[in-house]
Image (spheres, helix red, strand yellow):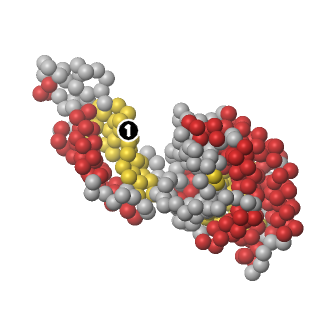
């Protein structure tokens, strides 16, 4: 069973009627970047846009101050649309989450008047802290996706991909504790925490030659002493590890943590290894949903999708392990720049970005409608 073209046209017109408001929402979020768990304005603006058109809104929601839920319709099929809106520290919206938020709101507004006719319950989830903090993993644990039959979002990118693939990602906070001492008077009394971190980094460099190419280890030193005439008694670092899937991530974590423990052993320091956030799982695209999306994207005149190996990470991957999900990416730069580059922040308010907001909103709304129709057959 498919959705009548007349109904799809009505959904499209509903989105386009809200065009100026959706683009203004995107620009406003872009102009006021807020990082993980501080997205108070963005969450409020999205929630208010939905409340204005009759959605029942709960904010804050599920134990997170910058999360919200908004629902419309009472059909037996529940589709969740994720709105991300967090920015990058120092780079603003160089990942284009302002587009994601506006497209999600637009899809919901397009569906709402027809939800009962389609047999849909539309649930919009304001999902903070995608860049850091794994907000969707926290929402999943809190029950935000309970009763959801399908989940979706779109993401801007330098190319067009329907079947998104992502790495699993784990984070690691490292702290070494040594003993301070004067480096010439009584260096033998000291235990150099910065040296411990250096030993670990050398071990990681040697480890990399034995890792599969899809396993990644990268990080930054966040502290390693304050003066050259004082042996550092504390050193800290933040690291990320990535693998093709969640199963491999566990093995990679064990091998990486062994390198940090080696640094402590070699220098006589103590080491603390903690996980600052839940692991991000690899994304598992639902084939039925992606077939519907691909047909609708083609009808909208989107560029021909490419096929890419895993190239990023997202906490939407955690959702995809539990709920049938899609995460198409929409080209807004033609390859001239990519996410997490300053130029991408500029592209996130370009005419190509505005087209992606509207196409993303309509494409998701049509896909949700087609999914509901298929469930009725």
Q: Position of residue 255 (x, y in %)?
A: 29, 55
Judge whether 299 appears above or below 353 on screen.
Answer: below
- Residue 338 picture quarter: top right
Exactly how many numbered labels are in the figure?
Answer: 1
Q: Nearer the viewer, residue 44 or 58?
A: 44
Judge whether 33 appears above or below 324 on screen.
Answer: above
Q: Nearer the viewer, residue 365 or 77?
A: 365
Residue 213 located left or right of residue 77: left
Which class describes the residues within 10 Å of circle 1: few (<14), some (14-19), or many (20+)? few
Residue 324 located left or right of residue 179: right
Q: Is residue 262 visible?
A: yes
Q: Nearer the viewer, residue 100 or 324?
A: 100
Residue 266 located left or right of residue 75: left
Q: Position of residue 232 (x, y in %)?
A: 26, 28
Judge whether 42 appears above or below 80 on screen.
Answer: above
Image point (85%, 66%), residue name? 7
Please name the residue that numbered disc 1 is placed on: 220
Image point (28%, 47%), residue name? 204
Q: Position of residue 316 (x, y in %)?
A: 56, 57
Q: Is residue 327 visible?
A: no
Determine whether the residue tagged by mark 1 lies in a helix, strand or loop. Answer: strand
Q: Position of residue 211 (x, y in %)?
A: 31, 57
Image point (13%, 18%), residue name? 185
Image point (71%, 64%), residue name? 298
């Amino acid at each position: 069973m498919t959705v009548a073209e007349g109904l799809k046209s009505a959904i499209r017109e509903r989105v386009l009627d809200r065009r100026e408001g959706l683009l203004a929402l995107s620009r406003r979020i872009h102009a006021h970047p807020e990082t993980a768990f501080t997205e108070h304005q963005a969450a409020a603006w999205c929630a208010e846009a939905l409340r204005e058109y009759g959605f029942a809104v709960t904010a804050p929601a599920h134990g997170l101050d910058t999360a919200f839920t908004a629902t419309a319709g009472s059909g037996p099929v529940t589709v969740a649309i994720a709105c991300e809106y967090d920015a990058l520290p120092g780079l603003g919206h160089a990942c284009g989450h302002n587009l994601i938020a506006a497209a999600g709101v637009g899809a919901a507004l397009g569906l709402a008047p027809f939800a009962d006719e389609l047999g849909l319950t539309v649930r919009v989830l304001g999902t903070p802290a995608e860049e850091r903090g794994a907000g969707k993993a926290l929402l999943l644990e809190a029950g935000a996706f309970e009763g959801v039959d399908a989940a979706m979002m779109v993401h801007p990118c330098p190319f067009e991909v329907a079947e998104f693939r992502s790495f699993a990602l784990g984070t690691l906070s490292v702290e070494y504790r040594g003993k301070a001492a004067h480096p010439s008077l009584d260096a033998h009394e000291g235990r150099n925490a910065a040296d411990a971190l250096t030993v670990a980094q050398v071990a990681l460099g040697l480890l990399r030659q034995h890792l599969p190419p899809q396993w990644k280890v990268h990080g930054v030193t966040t502290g390693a002493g304050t003066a050259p005439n004082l042996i550092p008694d504390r050193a800290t670092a933040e690291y990320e590890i990535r693998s093709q899937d969640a199963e491999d991530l566990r093995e990679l974590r064990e091998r990486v943590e062994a390198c940090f423990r080696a640094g402590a052993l070699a220098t006589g320091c103590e080491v603390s290894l903690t996980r600052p956030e839940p692991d991000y799982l690899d994304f598992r695209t639902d084939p039925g949903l992606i077939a519907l999306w691909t047909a609708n994207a083609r009808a909208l005149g989107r560029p021909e999708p490419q096929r890419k190996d895993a190239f990023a990470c997202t906490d939407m991957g955690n959702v995809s392990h539990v709920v049938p999900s899609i995460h198409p990416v929409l080209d807004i730069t033609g390859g001239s720049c990519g996410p997490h580059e300053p130029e991408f922040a500029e592209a996130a308010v370009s005419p190509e970005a505005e087209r992606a907001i509207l196409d993303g909103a309509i494409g998701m709304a049509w896909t949700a409608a087609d999914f509901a129709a298929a469930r009725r057959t």
